[in-house]
Image (cartoon, rainbow, N blue to C red):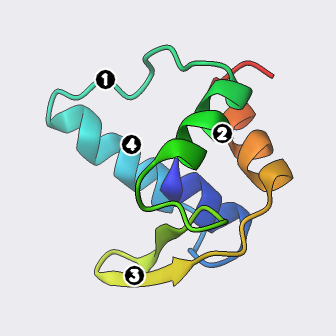
Amino acid sequence: FAARLAEGRGIASEGLTGRTTRLLTSLGLDVDGPLPAADELLAAFRVDKKFRGRVRFVLLREVGDPVVVDDVTDEELRATMRETGATA
């Protein structure tokens, strides 16, 4: 999710999501499991103890080059969630 969000914002170079997916798959992790609805995910973000009025993400420019962002809009989150398989 974070890799796709970083690519969509132009923070990461195209291909980071694919590389991340291949790595996780090679480790035996399920990257295509079902996701809850986007509204349920957004609600869960807001009750997290680290939530301070906005959702913060650590995104990668490249592997080993992180950046913290806290200006991600709900619409960006919903769009990225839909791209990863969450329902509207």
N-term mark: 2 or 3: 2
Q: Which residue is mark 3?
A: 66
- Of helix, strand and loop, which one carries label 1? loop
Q: Are marks 2 and 3 in contact (CB under 8 Å)?
A: no
N-term mark: 3 or 4: 4
Tell which tag, 4 or 2, sits nearer the viewer: 2
Number of other residues with Cα within 10 Å of mark 1, as a class: few under 14, some 14 to 19, many 20 or more: few
Give the residue type at disc 2. Leu
At horizontal 58% and vertical 18% (from top left) the residue drawn is 36
Residue most toward the left?
A: 27
Tell which tag, 3 or 4, sits nearer the viewer: 3
Query: Residue 14, image x and y in percent?
Result: 60, 66
Q: Are marks 4 and 2 in contact (CB under 8 Å)?
A: no
Query: Residue 69, image x and y in percent?
Result: 58, 78
- Of helix, strand and loop, which one carries label 4? helix
> What's the CA distance linking mark 4 and mark 2?
23 Å
- In the image, taking residue 11 as reference, residue 25 lies left or right, namely left
Q: Which residue is mark 2?
A: 42
- In the image, taking residue 35 as reference, residue 8 lies left or right, namely right
Q: Which residue is mark 1?
A: 30
Q: Which residue is mark 4?
A: 21
Number of other residues with Cα within 10 Å of mark 2, as a class: few under 14, some 14 to 19, many 20 or more: some
N-term mark: 1 or 2: 1
At horizontal 72% and vertical 49% (from top left) the residue drawn is 77
> What's the CA distance linking mark 4 and mark 1?
9 Å
Q: Are marks 3 and 1 in contact (CB under 8 Å)?
A: no
Residue 87 vs 55, above or below: the answer is: above
Give the residue type at disc 3. Pro
- Of helix, strand and loop, which one carries label 3? strand
Number of other residues with Cα within 10 Å of mark 3, as a class: few under 14, some 14 to 19, many 20 or more: some
